[in-house]
């Protein structure tokens, strides 16, 4: 962000410039070029399949009807997270292209391009130089691959589209004060919140923009119109925090952090995200989970560094507010993911690339403006610098996109870069478990996951199933029983225990396990089918037929 014009600091902002800051290119051509280079950078993603957690986002069979759509909007817990607009989008997409991953990947890339274009339009309205350059950096930056190549993170690309649309509409309202502009901006903001709660930071971000423009904030003009937005933001944040804790499971020993540890984590995470944005090397799907030790002086160095940067920017605000505004936007947008609130991913890592998809806009806007000024003063050298930068970013994005080709590739790469990642070991083992020829290879992966995390209930369950399927059900049963002691509510484990008991000649005991699995998940046909098979072992054919019929009915559900 450039230095604000002092003459406009306390006045109504002027309408946006009509100059097209795209190096002489008309906007439509800039959009076409941006779309083409982004598609080229993400080309490997077009042949990618579904990876981890995508099955929780691509609409489940029980939600594919109109009744399922009503559940998406009005039943908390019907979907993994209560983002009704996001899951409505997935519901529509499933009707369009079903379980074919290409459609989802194409749309996510298109949404990313759309967000980049809206980013450029916002910067142009704010008369910030290098608008299209900043948009290109955003579109091609490899730190965003996790949000674009991973279907589950359509929540990022779609919510950012609404976020930036609301920003544009509100900036028009700020100039003209027309109720229609306010209504449009408010509607888009609600759509953004319904897609991902991190967009709750928008009203605070708008105040940062107005402070950057005018040097101060006026209550009546700047703050009061945004009070309803702040109310919506707080409500959405409280609901999401409750869902994370009570429905998703973001509580327990893994989240028992002292306040001083959370403060250390916040400073360390801020430095980490800024570092990956400025130097995107060593990107990993799951980063190592840090050990937080407030008594270690060395662990406070990143936090002290971020405090030092903030202090320096504050000191320079009299000459330029741009750097401080970008820092405030970056920090504020990341705030929900800095450790002050429990997020389920903190179980295995305190940081993730997709957490900074929205937050990166502030730093990228500042970098784009600085590079545009440099290129303007040294046209040839500056142009070569910009072209080289974009080529490097695009190449890194192309390479990073290849790791999302399939779940096996993703988790193999993760383990290679983060050998202590117990979750990747378990998930790669599950991929092997799904292939009869690779079941034996799954067993050491589950055992490795349990070495890294002995209280890992899911890995105990998966190891038990793998042992059963390799003809060792008696060895499997203790692992499955331990899994249930750790997490009694895992329907998969009850089902796996039933399979092991039946395979070990204990079919009568297996019936109770299948009954509990069916109680916990009445919609899974495999449970009913396994229950029927156990009854056949006990020569109870009429009862077995009832369960086979129930399995057939469940498979026939729309």
Image (tube, rainbow, N blue to C red):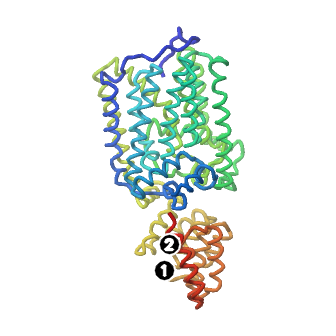
Residue 71: which quarter of the image?
A: bottom right
- Residue named by callout 1: 470
Label 2 vs label 1: CA separation?
10 Å
Q: Nearer the viewer, residue 66 or 514?
A: 66
Q: Nearer the viewer, residue 444 or 220?
A: 220
Q: Nearer the viewer, residue 324 or 250?
A: 250
Residue lying furthest top: 7
Q: Tag 2, which secondary structure?
A: helix
Q: Tell us which disc is closer to us: 2 or 1.
A: 1
Residue located 37% across and 21% down the image: 374
Residue lying furthest bottom: 539
Name which of mark 2 and mark 1 comes first in the sequence: 2
Q: Position of residue 187 (x, y in %)?
A: 56, 33
Q: Nearer the viewer, residue 81 or 180?
A: 180
Q: For the residue carrying disc 1, how many other residues have a C-alpha within 10 Å: few (<14), some (14-19), or many (20+)?
A: few
Q: Could you tell me how many numbered marks the image carries?
A: 2
Q: Position of residue 77 (x, y in %)?
A: 63, 55
Q: Position of residue 549 (x, y in %)?
A: 54, 78
Residue located 36% across and 20% down the image: 20
Q: Position of residue 459 (x, y in %)?
A: 57, 67
Q: For the residue carrying disc 2, how many other residues have a C-alpha within 10 Å: few (<14), some (14-19), or many (20+)?
A: many
Residue 475: tell me if it is visible. no
Residue located 58% across and 39% down the image: 193
- Residue named by callout 2: 443
Residue 535: which quarter of the image?
A: bottom right
Check if mark 2's residue and mark 1's residue have beta carbons within 8 Å: yes
Left or right of 295, for residue 352: left
Q: Looking at the picture, does residue 182 appear above or below residue 141?
A: above
Residue 408: tell me if it is visible. yes
């Amino acid at each position: 962000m450039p230095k604000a014009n002092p003459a406009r600091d306390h006045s109504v902002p002027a309408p946006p410039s009509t100059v097209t800051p795209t190096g002489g290119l008309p906007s439509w051509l800039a959009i076409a070029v941006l779309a083409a280079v982004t598609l080229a950078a993400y080309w490997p993603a077009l042949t990618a399949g579904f990876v981890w957690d995508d099955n929780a986002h691509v609409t489940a069979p029980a939600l594919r009807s109109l009744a399922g759509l009503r559940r998406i909007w009005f039943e908390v817990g019907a979907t993994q997270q209560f983002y009704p607009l996001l899951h409505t989008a997935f519901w529509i997409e499933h009707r369009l292209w079903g379980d074919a991953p290409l459609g989802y990947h194409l749309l996510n890339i298109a949404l990313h391009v759309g967000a980049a274009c809206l980013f450029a339009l916002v910067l142009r309205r704010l008369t910030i130089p290098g608008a299209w350059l900043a948009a290109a950096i955003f579109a091609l930056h490899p730190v965003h691959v996790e949000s674009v190549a991973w279907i589950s993170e359509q929540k990022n690309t779609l919510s950012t589209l609404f976020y930036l649309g609301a920003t544009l509409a509100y900036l028009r309202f700020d100039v003209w004060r027309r109720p229609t502009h306010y209504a449009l901006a408010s509607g888009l903001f609600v759509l953004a919140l319904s897609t991902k709660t991190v967009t709750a930071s928008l009203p605070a971000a708008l105040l940062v923009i107005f402070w950057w423009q005018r040097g101060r904030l006026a209550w009546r003009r700047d703050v009061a119109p945004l009070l309803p937005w702040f109310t919506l933001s707080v409500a959405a944040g409280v609901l999401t925090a409750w869902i994370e804790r009570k429905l998703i499971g973001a509580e327990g020993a893994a989240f028992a952090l002292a306040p001083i540890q959370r403060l250390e984590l916040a400073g360390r995470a801020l430095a980490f995200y800024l570092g990956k944005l400025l130097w995107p090397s060593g990107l990993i799907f799951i980063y190592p989970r840090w050990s937080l030790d407030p008594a270690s002086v060395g662990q406070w160095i990143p936090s002290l560094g971020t405090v030092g940067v903030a202090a320096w920017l504050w000191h320079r605000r009299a000459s330029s507010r741009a750097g401080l505004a970008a820092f405030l936007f970056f920090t504020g947008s990341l705030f929900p993911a800095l450790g002050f609130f429990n997020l389920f991913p903190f179980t295995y890592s305190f940081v993730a690339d997709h957490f900074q998809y929205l937050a990166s806009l502030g730093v990228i806007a500042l970098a784009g403006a600085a590079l545009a000024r440099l290129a303007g003063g040294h046209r040839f050298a500056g142009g070569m610098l910009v072209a080289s930068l974009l080529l490097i970013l695009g190449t890194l994005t192309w390479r990073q996109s290849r790791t999302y080709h399939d779940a096996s590739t993703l988790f193999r790469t993760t383990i290679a870069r983060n050998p202590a990642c117990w979750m990747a070991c378990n998930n790669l083992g599950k991929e092997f478990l799904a292939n009869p020829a690779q079941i034996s290879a799954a067993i050491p992966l589950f055992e490795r996951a349990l070495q890294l995390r002995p209280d890992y209930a899911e890995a105990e369950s998966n190891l038990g199933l793998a042992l059963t399927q390799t003809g060792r059900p008696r060895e499997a049963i203790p692992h499955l029983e331990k899994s249930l002691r750790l997490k009694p509510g895992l329907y998969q484990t009850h089902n796996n225990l039933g399979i092991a008991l039946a395979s070990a000649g204990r079919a009568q005991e297996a019936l109770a396990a299948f009954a509990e699995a069916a109680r916990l998940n009445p919609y899974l046909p495999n449970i009913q089918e396994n229950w029927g098979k156990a009854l056949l072992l006990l020569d109870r054919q009429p009862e077995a037929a009832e369960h086979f019929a129930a399995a057939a009915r469940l498979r026939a559900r729309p």
